[in-house]
């Protein structure tokens, strides 16, 4: 499934900061205050609360019900499935659908009952069992068909027995309700070209296929499918495979319906079956024999909203085929933009369904961030065509094999089509850093034991940041220490062996080991399974504590020392790849494979210019706690020559030290020591992380009237000025020059808002100036990148004239929804209380 509210298009996260940090900050800043003298207290409105970019996706669908496993007596081989949603355009509800499924099964063990999944469906006609198929005309009489709603299974009690080694066909007619929803087969209403319309679409992952047709709804029970959809003639029907026949049928009332028949599918899991019935239009292109069609509302197609998605889809397919060295096996791929779809996207084989916002952009919109978001969601879903669709995890406990790998390829694919994207910085800022923040508080490992995911376990809870982001981070680390070349070679071998079948993570380790054993460039300290199990089967991650006088590196599980209870145990150890650097030169990769180890080569001399940096460019999933000597040297180096340390490592150094402060490892002064250099920091993604740590959203209101505000203001503004002036220089005339600056689009608004909030006069003046320009000429467009901040502070530092203008523009019929939202927010920025009460 596509990322839910995560990834490139979520501008920033809400940083969690404990009360301890606030207190410590206060104390530390009081010390600073002594140095800087008291400052004038100044009131200012809060910074922007929302990042620019597309709206956040809606909340996830309700949790799936039972995860009851089916007995292993019967193995499905093939489904003949007919679905008939009784929907006509313009018709009022309630709606229903009916269907017929004939499932060919192989009997593995003798049984007197056939058990399969079914949820919320009613029988329609009598169920039957034909077979054994080797005996023409043979049948087994059905005594009773029972529905166990809680267990989500249907049980066919038989008068005879099914015999091992024989094939049978289970025949079931069924009907169900068709509702406006987000899962199973659902109805979606929308407006197109001024008319209200509706469509029918499906979302089966993880266990909603059983709500649409009775089936063996487990990922390892793969089968082929012949699908037939009966629908209103004004709609087109889509499924995983190409349509091979369109005919007509009359219902009991004599009304005409269209029957669309699809080609036999490849062997696949039920959660990947998909159906869309709509009156959309499409754009199309063929790439290496794969016919790609992108479907959307007619209006959106006409306006070119999916042209960008069409331009990149073929290239990403080709890119993935090339690096994985495994061809895409289907002759067609439909991508459908469904209004009101729950996930960002769903990778159904050959029929990928997206939320509209994840697939559309205005052709005039040149912003890198918008394109990057589309490119990443499309890459993620295309990555699944191999990881998930071709090779599927055996069971949901290894969901990360789907989602972690798709999230990893999401970044490779996106940078392939948008090469200007700073991949490593984005990966760290959006994936690794946020999940490191979360992972220390979640007692769940990436790969759970299979029997734990059973009974009432909520499968939806597995679709979380651990599965997606930790999965991608671990993959990133693995690819790093293996080298990408070996890693891809191993993936090819894994994909080829398990095509149209299932695997668990040990199967992946086996194929990596094979590739490692066949060469001698890369040497590992232990079998790959042992190394990787320490990352995937244990919860949390390590922090390395250094004593560089002796060269000792010690690992322990990173945990919050402030909250520790005496019963807690944090005894995990990992096999850790250590990339490192001494005085700017990269050193050979080394490994920490026990709790503590001496590395004589890492001892530092007396010289203040001798320094060590570990986990260069965040190649490993862990934090580093340096000793005071080295930290002082790093802080000094940053002040003299920040670029001596790679940008991602600077980001990581500071984030690590704030996290260490938060969790009681080091005092806040240590963190502030490392931020002293910031006047020379010109990377917005680093600044954004610093501001999240120093002014987390939940502290804004506390800080506003607090003693600490003037101190923070003094400390930060002095350092923010150079980068503020750099970016302010592009505004208003030259803002197009930031078109390719991904982080300017992601973070500039927040940065500017913070500068204004801290009372930076230049920022307030700029806002007033642009706001005045707009008042004089309402046609003038304030650059979208900073519009929210300008509106807000234009009103805040203005009088009732500014407020009235905002109110007037808000009520103006031409203003679009986004602008209205920004204006509404701006009016709340007014400082005069009588204005606020209006
Ligand atoms: Zn996914």
Image (spheres, rainbow, N blue to C red):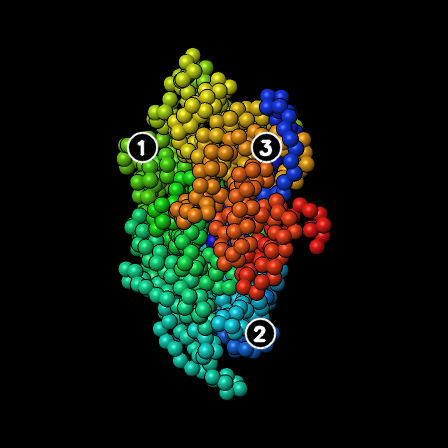
Looking at the image, which residue is at 38% across and 61% down?
307
Marker disc for residue 811 = none
Label 2: few (<14), some or many (≥20) within 10 Å? Answer: some
Give the image location of residue 725, x and y in percent.
47, 37
- Residue for badge 3: 713
Label 3: few (<14), some or many (≥20) within 10 Å? Answer: many
Q: CA distance from mark 2 to mark 1?
A: 60 Å
Residue 734's place in the image compared with 125, above or below, is above
Q: Nearer the viewer, residue 48 or 736?
A: 736
Looking at the image, which residue is at 31% across and 48% down?
323
> In the picture, residue 331 is in which quadrant?
bottom left
Label 1 C-beta lies within 8 Å of the nearest ligand 1 atom? no
Q: Nearer the viewer, residue 349 or 355?
A: 355
Nearer mark to the viewer, of 3 and 2: 3
Q: Helix or strand or loop: what does disc 1 sit on?
A: loop
Q: CA distance from mark 3 to mark 1?
A: 50 Å
Confirm or deny contact between disc 2 and disc 1 (CB under 8 A): no
Q: CA distance from mark 3 to mark 2?
A: 60 Å
- Residue for badge 2: 95
Give the image location of residue 834, x and y in percent.
72, 50
Mark 3 or mark 2: which comes first in sequence? 2
Residue 168's place in the image compared with 645, above or below, is below
Q: Helix or strand or loop: what does disc 2 sit on?
A: strand
Q: Nearer the viewer, residue 766 or 401?
A: 766
Q: The C terminus is located in which quarter?
A: bottom right
Residue at the limit of the structure toward the top, as seen here: 606
- Residue for badge 1: 522
Looking at the image, which residue is at 63% across and 55% down?
804
Mark 3 or mark 1: which comes first in sequence? 1
Looking at the image, which residue is at 48% across and 27% down?
677
Residue 280's place in the image compared with 504, above or below, is below
């Amino acid at each position: 499934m596509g990322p839910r509210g995560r990834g490139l298009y979520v501008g920033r996260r809400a940083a969690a900061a404990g009360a301890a940090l606030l207190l410590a900050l206060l104390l530390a800043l009081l010390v600073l205050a002594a140095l800087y003298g008291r400052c004038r207290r100044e009131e200012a409105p809060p910074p922007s609360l929302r990042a620019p970019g597309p709206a956040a996706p809606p909340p996830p669908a309700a949790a799936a019900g039972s995860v009851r496993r089916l007995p292993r007596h019967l193995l499905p081989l093939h489904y003949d499935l007919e679905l008939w949603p009784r929907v006509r355009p313009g018709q009022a509800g309630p709606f229903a659908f009916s269907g017929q499924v004939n499932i060919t099964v192989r009997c593995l063990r003798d049984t007197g009952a056939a058990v399969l999944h079914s949820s919320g469906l009613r029988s329609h006609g009598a169920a039957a069992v034909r077979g054994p198929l080797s005996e023409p005309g043979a049948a087994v009489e059905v005594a009773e068909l029972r529905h166990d709603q809680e267990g989500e299974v249907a049980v066919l009690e038989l008068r005879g027995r099914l015999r091992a080694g024989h094939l049978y066909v289970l025949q079931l007619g069924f009907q169900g309700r068709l509702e406006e929803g987000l899962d199973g087969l659902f109805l979606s209403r929308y407006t197109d070209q001024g008319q209200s319309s509706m469509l029918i679409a499906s979302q089966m992952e993880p266990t909603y296929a059983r709500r649409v047709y009775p089936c063996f709804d487990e990922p390892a029970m793969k089968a082929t499918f012949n699908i037939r959809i009966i629908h209103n003639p004004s709609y087109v029907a889509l499924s995983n495979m190409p349509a091979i026949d369109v005919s007509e049928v009359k219902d009991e009332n004599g009304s005409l319906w269209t029957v669309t028949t699809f080609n036999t599918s490849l062997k696949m899991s039920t959660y990947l079956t998909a159906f869309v019935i709509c009156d959309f239009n499409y754009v199309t292109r063929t790439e290496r024999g794969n016919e790609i069609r992108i479907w959307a509302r007619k209006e959106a197609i006409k306006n070119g909203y999916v042209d960008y998605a069409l331009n990149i889809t073929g290239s990403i397919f080709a890119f993935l085929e090339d690096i994985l060295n495994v061809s895409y096996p289907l002759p067609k791929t439909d991508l459908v933009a469904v209004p009101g779809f729950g996930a960002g996207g769903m990778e159904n084989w050959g029929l990928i369904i997206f939320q509209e916002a994840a697939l559309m952009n205005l052709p005039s919109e040149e912003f890198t961030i918008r394109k990057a978001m589309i490119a990443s969601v499309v890459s993620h879903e295309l990555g699944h065509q191999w990881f998930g669709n071709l090779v599927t995890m055996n069971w949901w406990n290894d969901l990360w094999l789907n989602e972690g790998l798709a999230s990893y390829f999401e970044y490779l694919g996106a940078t392939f089509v948008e090469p200007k994207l700073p991949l490593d910085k984005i990966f760290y800022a959006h994936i690794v850093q946020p999940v490191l923040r979360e992972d220390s508080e979640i007692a769940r490992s990436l790969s759970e034991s299979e029997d734990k995911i059973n009974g009432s376990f909520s499968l939806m809870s597995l679709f979380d940041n651990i599965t997606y982001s930790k999965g991608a981070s671990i993959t990133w680390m693995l690819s790093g220490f293996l080298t990408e070349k070996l890693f891809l070679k191993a993936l090819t071998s894994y994909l080829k062996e398990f095509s149209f079948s299932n695997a668990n993570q040990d199967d992946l380790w086996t194929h990596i080991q094979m590739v490692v054993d066949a060469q001698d460039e890369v040497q590992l300290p232990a079998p790959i399974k042992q190394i990787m199990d320490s990352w995937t089967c244990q919860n949390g991650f390590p922090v390395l504590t250094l004593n560089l006088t002796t060269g000792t590196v010690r690992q322990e599980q990173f945990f919050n020392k402030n909250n520790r209870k005496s019963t807690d145990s944090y005894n995990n150890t990992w096999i850790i790849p250590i990339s490192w650097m001494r005085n700017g030169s990269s050193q050979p990769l080394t490994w920490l494979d026990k709790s503590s180890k001496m590395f004589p080569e890492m001892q530092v001399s007396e010289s203040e210019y001798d320094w060590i940096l570990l986990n260069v460019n965040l190649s490993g999933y862990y934090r580093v706690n340096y000793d005071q000597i080295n930290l002082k040297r790093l802080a000094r180096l940053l002040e003299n020559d920040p670029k001596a340390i790679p940008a991602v490592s600077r980001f990581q150094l500071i984030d690590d030290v704030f996290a260490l402060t938060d969790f009681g490892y080091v005092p806040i002064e240590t963190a502030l020591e490392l931020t002293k250099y910031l006047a020379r920091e010109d990377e917005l993604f680093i600044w954004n992380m610093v501001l999240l740590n120093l002014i987390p959203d939940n502290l804004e209101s506390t800080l506003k009237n607090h003693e600490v505000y003037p101190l923070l203001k003094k400390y930060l503004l002095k350092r923010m000025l150079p980068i503020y002036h750099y970016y302010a220089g592009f505004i208003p005339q030259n803002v197009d020059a930031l078109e390719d600056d991904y982080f300017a689009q992601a973070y500039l608004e927040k940065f500017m808002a913070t500068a204004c909030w801290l009372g930076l006069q230049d920022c307030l003046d700029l806002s007033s100036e642009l706001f005045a320009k707009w008042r004089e000429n309402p046609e003038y467009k304030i650059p979208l990148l900073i519009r929210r901040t300008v509106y807000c502070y234009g009103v805040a530092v203005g009088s009732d004239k500014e407020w009235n203008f905002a109110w007037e523009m808000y009520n103006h019929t031409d203003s679009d929804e986004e602008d209205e939202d920004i204006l509404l927010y701006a009016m709340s920025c007014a400082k005069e209380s009588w204005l606020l009460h209006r």
